[in-house]
Image (cartoon, rainbow, N blue to C red):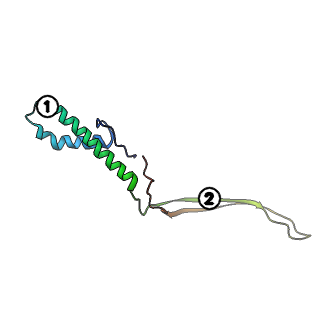
Amino acid sequence: MTLLAGDINASDGMAKAIYDQMIVVLEPDLEGLAEDAKTPIRDNWKKLAFAIAKGVISHLENNLEIDQVKTGGSVYASVSGSTAAGGADSHSHSVSLTAVQNNVKWNQTSDGIGKVKK
């Protein structure tokens, strides 16, 4: 999942998720107001939702530390060549080997800063 702030109209991304919750929590407070009076309030909520989303995502992109990530897989190492001739009576042989180490585990080597997908 990428971090998507959305837009000033809170039509997608985190801004929409925040705005949707603002509607659930704050809409009851608008009860009794005419619809034309509610519109500018909702428009400001959309802007506020976007501002919050943009700030949160910017903060995460710049400061999020990823810790204790482990990954794994298999390692395949191919070696080919020939043995070297040693003396007057020596001869060489072709060599072709593949070494496999399954289920190798690696630990994270950085703090992850700057690695958050945008």
The mark total stands at 2
Q: Where is residue 62 in the image (x, y as percent from the top left)?
A: 40, 53
Residue 53 falls in which quadrant of the image? top left
Residue shown at 38% from the left, 56% from the top: 63
Amino acid type at mark 1:
Ala
Residue at the far left: name it. 32
The answer to whether one can see residue 95 in this image is no
Q: Name the residue under label 1.
A: 37
45, above or below 63, in the image: above
Q: What element carries label 1?
A: helix
**Cβ–Cβ below 8 Å for labels 2 and 1?**
no
- 46 left or right of 6 in image: left
* Mark 2 residue type: Tyr
The residue that mark 2 highlights is 76
* Residue nearer the viewer, 47 or 4: 47
Against 111, is 23 above or below? above
